[in-house]
Image (tube, grey):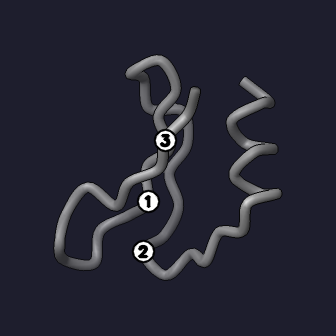
Amino acid sequence: MGTATNGTKNKGSWNVYKGGKLIKSFPWDWKPNSKEVKKIINEK
């Protein structure tokens, strides 16, 4: 199962984790939709 978090309150980045490991990062202003998130999680 993958999760996404921005990690900080300030303008940092969205980090996508899978199995506790960072697999992808995006700019703070990224507006993910569910299809994008599922694709990223499933490609690893």
Q: Which residue corresponds to mark 1? A: 14
Please name which of the two marks, 1 or 3, marks the residue nearer to the observer.
3
Circle 3: element type: strand
Q: Which residue corresponds to mark 3? A: 3
User: Vertically, is 19 above or below 28?
Assistant: above
Circle 1: element type: strand
Please state the horizontal and vertical placement of residue 9, each as a whole percent of the image. Answer: 17, 72
- Residue 20 placement, left or right of 4: left
Closer-to-camera residue (34/26): 34
Where on the picture, by quarter, is residue 12? bottom left
Please state the horizontal and vertical placement of residue 13, each as a whole percent of the image. Answer: 38, 63
Tell me the amino acid under the disc marked 1: Trp
Tell me the amino acid under the disc marked 2: Trp
Q: Earlier in the sequence, mark 1 or mark 3?
A: 3
Please state the horizontal and vertical placement of residue 23, each as a whole percent of the image. Answer: 54, 33
Q: Which residue corresponds to mark 2? A: 28
Q: CA distance from mark 1 to mark 2?
A: 6 Å
Q: Residue at x 72, y 23 (%)?
A: 44
